[in-house]
Amino acid sequence: MSTSGVGETQPAGTVQGSGLAEIIDALRVGPFRRLFLVLSLSALGDWLGLLAGAAFASSQVSGATAKGAAFGSVIAVQLLPAFILGPLSGVVADRFDRRLTMVISDVARFLLFLSIPIVGFLVNSPVRVVTWTAIALFLAQVAAQIWTPAKEAEVPNLLPRSRLEAANQLTLATTYGITPIIAALLFSAMARLPRPGGVGPADYALIFDALTFLASAFVVLFYVKEMSQRTSRPSQPSDDDSPHHVPGRQVMRDLIDGGRFIARTRLVRGIVVGVLGAFAGAGVVIGTANFYARSLGGGEATFGILFAAIFAGFGVGIAGGPALVGTLSRRRWFALSIVLAGIAVIGLSVAPRLSLAVLGCVVTGAAAGMAFLSGLTMIGGDIGDDVRGRVVAFIQTAVRITLLLAIALSSLLVGLGSSRELGIGAVDIHISTTRLLLFLIGVAGIAVGIVSFKQIDDRPGVPIWKDIWHGVRRRPLSDPPKKRP
């Protein structure tokens, strides 16, 4: 399998710092500009659907317990497709026409989201309505699980390598920064609309949500036809009698080949180790945030401030990271971002007051954002088109599982451990399980960053501080980077 991506004459280690000019240049590429419109619509639909679907299910029943159960169950079922489909969605992205895959997925989501309020009007049984809502949202997330690897794998084919990082900046900032805010504001605004015949804000939101996916399918089908002009496709068996010609066996072969590629390629191993380590750390920070807020003497308001600070930092890292590091090797930037996140989490574990804790959360989020951006750029630029979808799908699945497990286990551990008083002679020492866990995770994050660095470093022998110094001064190193497999 090929490991070279589009524009391989410009290695990842020499990408220039992205800024407004680079983002504008990326948007000047017609196919990407139209695909970005599609991404914006789809992201808005995803966030609005998450809010509206759960709110709709909750509105169908009465009583605090029933409402909580309906809300939670609808949220939970939307996380299941990542566990069930996993890397299989990457096989779909690599084996079939990605444009048609995205169109079919969007049309399916249009029909599923539209069906939810329709069933709500036609069926009188709250249990059946909530059940169908959960089923429809589950199927919609199955479609989204297939849509995303197809989109992520195709973006590098629509842009020159030099514009890929700026394009990733734009899409990540839109997906995780702008559209969640717009979705929340839209949902709030819909609460003020007239309610004829019992129509609520969730009904309006679900119908609007469905239309965003229909518009997305329309744009991809008629205005991004370049996505069907792939020059690199997975190898097909030439002998019709080959055992791999059986569709089921071919899918299994693709899964196995993708797994071997991930296991054997140093770059991919380094990215996987780094990304999973970073998201495990983020999951622990999120899972312990409520207890951590109490250790600062705060409550729900403090928890909200810390939570917002993490995502604000994430956006800052994506928007300002490339300009900050300049010509620094992107592979080194990725690993150093994870190390920085680990250091920031250690700072959180010893922060005595809220102001320092907020700063620690911002730095943690910024480091995670920079790692996410540089990792996504490396996947797009240095991973071959014939296997890129499977790599994206594997990382997406592993990230979700890692994040959920880290949140669940960390919250359970700090809940059981709580705080303890340790008596040493006449001195009583207050020990917080939350802070101890954060400290350990911070140390682990530094270790993960170092391991990732050793896997993907493209400038062996060049002192890291020299690389950083030249990078921030926008002065490329005189000695060219040595490529690693």
Image (spheres, grey):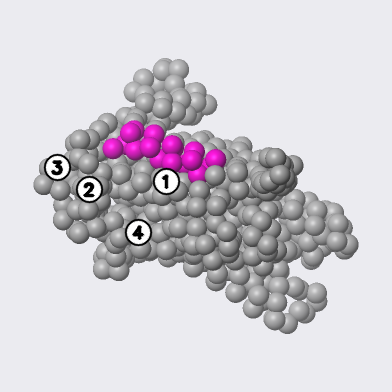
Quarter of the picture holding the C terminus: top left
Q: Is residue 402 left or right of residue 250?
A: right
Identify whether 148 is placed above or below 300.
above
**32 within the magenta span:** no
Q: Element under label 2?
A: helix
Residue beneath label 4, please?
A: 321
The amino acid type, in three-letter code, at marker 2 is Asp
The amino acid type, in three-letter code, at marker 3 is Pro
Residue beneath label 3, please?
A: 480
Residue beneath label 1, please?
A: 338
Q: Which residues are magenta?
A: 440-457
Between label 3 and label 2, give the one nearer the viewer: 2
Q: Main secondary structure of the magenta part?
A: helix
Gap between marks 4 and 2, in whole Å? 16 Å
The residue lying at 37 percent from left, 56 percent from top is 168
Q: Element under label 4?
A: helix
Which tag, 3 or 1, sits closer to the chain's start?
Answer: 1
Gap between marks 1 and 4, in whole Å? 13 Å
Residue beneath label 2, please?
A: 467
Q: Element under label 1?
A: helix
Which tag, 1 or 2, sits closer to the chain's start?
Answer: 1
Q: Element under label 3?
A: loop
Identify whether 270 is placed above or below 133.
above
Measured as percent of width and height from the top left, residue 385 is found at 33, 40
Towards the viewer: 424 or 349? 424
Which tag, 1 or 4, sits closer to the chain's start?
Answer: 4
The residue lying at 52 percent from left, 62 percent from top is 356
Q: Is residue 12 left or right of residue 70?
A: left
How many other residues sit within 10 Å of disc 3, few (<14), some (14-19) or many (≥20)?
few
